[in-house]
Amino acid sequence: MRRTFAILLAAGVLLSYDSWVLLFLSPYPFPLTGYVSELAAADQPYSWLFRSGDALAGSLMVLIAILGVRGWRPRFGRAAMPLAVAIGVAGLATIGDSIAALPCTQTFDPVCYAEYTANPLRPDFLLHAIASSIVAIGAMASLVIAVIALRRRGSLGTAYGRGVLAVLGVLIVANIGSVIIEMTWRAGQGYIQALGVLVLAAWAAHLGFIAVMDRGAAVDRGAVDRGADDRGAEADRGAAVDRGSADA
């Protein structure tokens, strides 16, 4: 039952966060030449679907953070709490992202682009930008925390530690690359953003899986240890009774 729940939790956040794979629903022929978030823009026909995916993914990330407070201790030690805070913040910001969706597709709609350039601090544009930035910061913070924790525990040189480092590197490249592409060509950033979303979703799914499985394994080990202690105590009491009978 525990393994089934862990798999469903991981699959849920992975699939809901990667709703961009339904990009064929966009009315534009190459939607990833713009922002991934433009799929959920308020003026798009399937905005509700992509926004629902973000809301569900964010909610599952908050649940994962709650489970991880204790579930990540066997792997990350005392860093489990700050890691949970980082993932929880990213999850809440993802929910905020779904609520404060872009009003229109500035990459494809000249009128929308003119409105944005005329007033980039307009609340509906600004709130979305803030929420998206918090998601990125929370995600990278969670990976930095995990890397530091693994280094302190001497696990950074393992295959698992190198994998976490690789995920952090991909997210950094994706975020910086998106900014560079936007500043240089103003189109095409969606492709590298999609990669970043895919990697972040996989990281969140992994955290959800181990939050359930590692905690369960720790509980099972604790039960075994307690059982061994109880048996040892019973044996000691039996030996004491035997010695008492012999003395009598």
Image (cartoon, grey):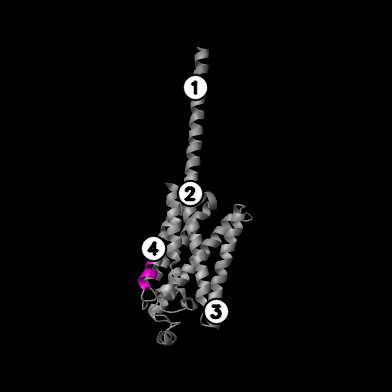
> Which comes before the other along the chain, label 1 or label 4?
4
Q: Are the two marked residues, 4 and 2, in contact with CB atoms closer than 8 angstroms?
A: no
In three-dimensional space, the C-alpha distance between marks 3 and 4, rounded to whole angstroms, equals 29 Å
Is residue 240 in the magenta section? no
Residue type at mark 3 is Ile
Residue at the spot 58% in from the left edge and 66% down from the top edge? 169
> Which comes before the other along the chain, label 3 or label 2?
3
Query: SS for tag 1?
Result: helix
Q: Are the two marked residues, 3 and 2, in contact with CB atoms closer than 8 angstroms?
A: no
Query: SS for tag 3?
Result: helix
In three-dimensional space, the C-alpha distance between marks 3 and 2, rounded to whole angstroms, equals 40 Å
Q: Which residue is mark 1?
A: 238
Could you say which is closer to the camera, residue 29 or residue 225?
A: 29
Query: SS for tag 2?
Result: helix
**Residue lying farthest to the right in this orientation:** 157
- Estimate the x, y position of residue 49 in percent, counting from the top left: 37, 69
Q: Which residue is mark 4?
A: 56
Front label number (2 vs 1):
2
Residue segment shown in magenta: 46-52
> Which comes before the other along the chain, label 4 or label 2?
4
Residue type at mark 1 is Gly
> Which comes before the other along the chain, label 2 or label 1?
2
Which class describes the residues within 10 Å of circle 3: few (<14), some (14-19), or many (20+)?
some
Q: Which residue is mark 2?
A: 213
Q: Which residue is mark 3?
A: 181
In three-dimensional space, the C-alpha distance between marks 4 and 2, rounded to whole angstroms, equals 22 Å
Q: Which mark is residue 183?
A: none
In three-dimensional space, the C-alpha distance between marks 1 and 3, rounded to whole angstroms, equals 75 Å
Residue type at mark 2 is Met
Q: Are the two marked residues, 2 and 1, in contact with CB atoms closer than 8 angstroms?
A: no
